[in-house]
Amino acid sequence: MGRWEPNARERLARAALDLFGERGYEQTTVAEIARRAGLTERTYFRHYADKREVLFGGSAVLGHVFAKAVAEAPPSAAPIDMVAAGLEAVAAVFPERETSRQRQSVVGSHPELQERELIKLAALSAAVTEALRVRGVPDPGAALAAEAGIAVFKVGYERWIAPGEHRQLADLLSESLTELKAVTAGG
Amino acid sequence: MGRWEPNARERLARAALDLFGERGYEQTTVAEIARRAGLTERTYFRHYADKREVLFGGSAVLGHVFAKAVAEAPPSAAPIDMVAAGLEAVAAVFPERETSRQRQSVVGSHPELQERELIKLAALSAAVTEALRVRGVPDPGAALAAEAGIAVFKVGYERWIAPGEHRQLADLLSESLTELKAVTAGG
């Protein structure tokens, strides 16, 4: 096989989720993930640094999408509206709910995966803070608005993947942002 | 030596910070920390599960103090005022600024310590969420108010330990909370 594998990242991520679900996370090797995806182990490591990382391939994308939306918000937008634009953009590129649920059931039951999830969220928060600074939002407002956005994302995302939930991610994020505003206003 | 060592936890934490500063974190062993504190390795492991944990001994205390303040806030308090009471209580029991700066310079330069820091903050957020629920704050408001409180804590704490900063932690937390309110209000 040549160096170019169409959709290799996505195929590996899909194969990994399926295998983690079938056999368990610990019991699955990188070699098995590559084989299931019809790819080699070498190709796997061209895309992901280790076994954990295949579950976090989307997080860099989220950071870019969020930061880009902040960068492109109207000049008159308040910091929290820039954050709202970022959340909306993130919701638009998110994988399907069932995929996210599968992923969450693996991450949620392994402390070392939860650790990496927290690190990715911290990196997302730093990227959003930086994007807000570039838009001229002064510290500490930039960091606070970014952290508020990540809090809304976490809470909205958890609601979205909860059993029986049918509302869309964009709606739940927007609703959670409204709730955060009400809560911080003392309402 | 008997089982009871006065202030063993604090002595170990102090010895660890001093040694990490003098020799570096990697170069310091648990045996050396215990020796510097005038205690045995066995005593060390009665208090801390591993070498990392000696840097996080205060985090359970913070959780208790924060949750207790939430529990004891006046019945009429809004969720964000309960969180403000928690932040105030936390500021009152915090170690000295210079100790926190020493600690931060170790934690900030070691990814595995930053990971554990993120985990402790997530646990703190969960404890505050639970305390707010007990006070009758419904979801997702409880989680959002707690996350907002942790965001304020992180930002205020970073400002407090910044070089040249002289204001008190309580003032910086209170100011950061005011800024968060302004930012989320769209100001």
Image (cartoon, coloured by chain):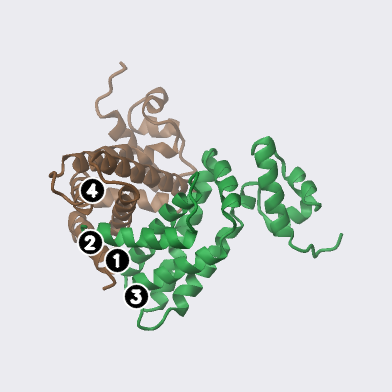
Chain colours: A brown, B green
Instruction: State the residue position of label 1.
Output: A184
Toward which corner of the image does residue B130 lie, by quadrant?
A: bottom left
Q: Which chain is mark 1 on?
A: A
- Name the residue beneath numbered marker 3: B137
> To which quarter of the image does residue A38 belong?
top left
Quick one: label 1 or label 4, which is nearer the N terminus?
4
Q: Report the amino acid beneath label 4.
A: Glu
Q: Is residue B111 visible?
A: yes
Disc 2 to disc 3: CB gap under 8 Å: no
The reply to the same-chain question for discs 1 and 4 is yes
For the residues labelled 1 and 2, say whether their Cβ atoms are less than 8 Å apart.
yes
Residue tagged 4:
A96
The amino acid beneath tag 2 is: Ala
Q: Is mark 1 on a helix, strand or loop?
A: helix
Chain of the residue under the numbered disc 2 shown in the image = B
2 or 4: mark nearer the eye: 2
Question: Quick one: label 4, few (<14), some, or many (20+) residues within 10 Å?
Answer: few
Quadrant containing the N terminus of chain A is top left
In the picture, the disc for residue A26 is: none
- Tell me the chain of label 3: B
Q: Do the residues labelled 3 and 4 touch (CB within 8 Å)?
A: no
Residue at 54 percent across and 38 percent down: it is B109
* Label at residue B185: 2
